[in-house]
Amino acid sequence: QVQLVESGGGLVQPGGSLRLSCAASEFTYDDYAIGWFRQAPGKEREGVSCISSHDGSTYYADSVKGRFTISRDNAKNTVYLQMNSLKSEDTAVYYCAAEIKPIRIGLAPALYDYWGQGTQVTVSS
């Protein structure tokens, strides 16, 4: 059973940075995409960024372009989300998810097959 475990969340001041990690275990697939999503209270879950295992191509939501960077370490089966210039509106629970043998890579939650439990990110002074 695939397991995804997020870490790295916490409290940070506006303008600060955090790096989230998504560690995958029991992961034997070689064709997949890993996405980061977030959900704020009272709001729908939204896609933030994703990365393809096939060619390393990346996608970002407009709201985080230029501030967030997704990367991967294949040897560690880990995907990272570096978040810089954080804003109060970035406050949410952040989830990572895996899409196996993707036909289409994107930021729609419905595309993804496995989900982690989430990590809280709070941006506040």
Image (cartoon, rainbow, N blue to C red):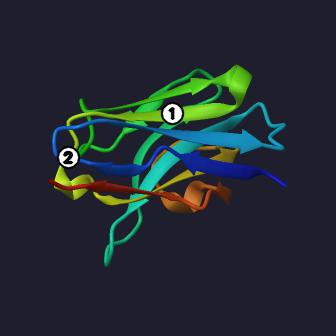
Residue where numbered disc 1 is placed: 80
Give the secondary structure at mark 1. Answer: strand
- Contact, CB < 8 Å: mark 2 with mark 1? no
Q: Quadrant of residue 121?
A: bottom left
Q: Nearer the viewer, residue 66 or 89?
A: 89
**For the point 20% across and 36% down, which residue is it?**
85
| Rendered position, 13 above or below 57 | below
| Left or right for 56, reference 75 | left
Q: Position of residue 53 (x, y in %)?
A: 64, 28
Three-letter amino acid code at disc 1?
Answer: Tyr
Three-letter amino acid code at disc 2?
Answer: Gln
Residue where numbered disc 2 is placed: 13
Q: Nearer the viewer, residue 62 or 14?
A: 14
**For the point 51% across and 59% down, which residue is it?**
109
Q: Position of residue 54 (x, y in %)?
A: 65, 25
Q: Position of residue 48 (x, y in %)?
A: 38, 47
| Rendered position, 75 above or below 4 | above
Q: Which mark is residue 96?
A: none
| Left or right for 60, reference 97 | left
**Residue 101 in view of the camera:** no
| Left or right for 36, reference 5 | left
Image quadrant for the N terminus? bottom right
Q: Nearer the viewer, residue 2 or 117?
A: 117
Q: Quadrant of residue 105?
A: top right
Upstream in the sequence, badge 2 or badge 1?
2
Q: Nearer the viewer, residue 78 or 9?
A: 9
Give the secondary structure at mark 2. Answer: loop
Q: Residues within 10 Å of mark 1 (few under 14, many from 20)?
A: many
**For the point 48% across and 47% down, which residue is it?**
36
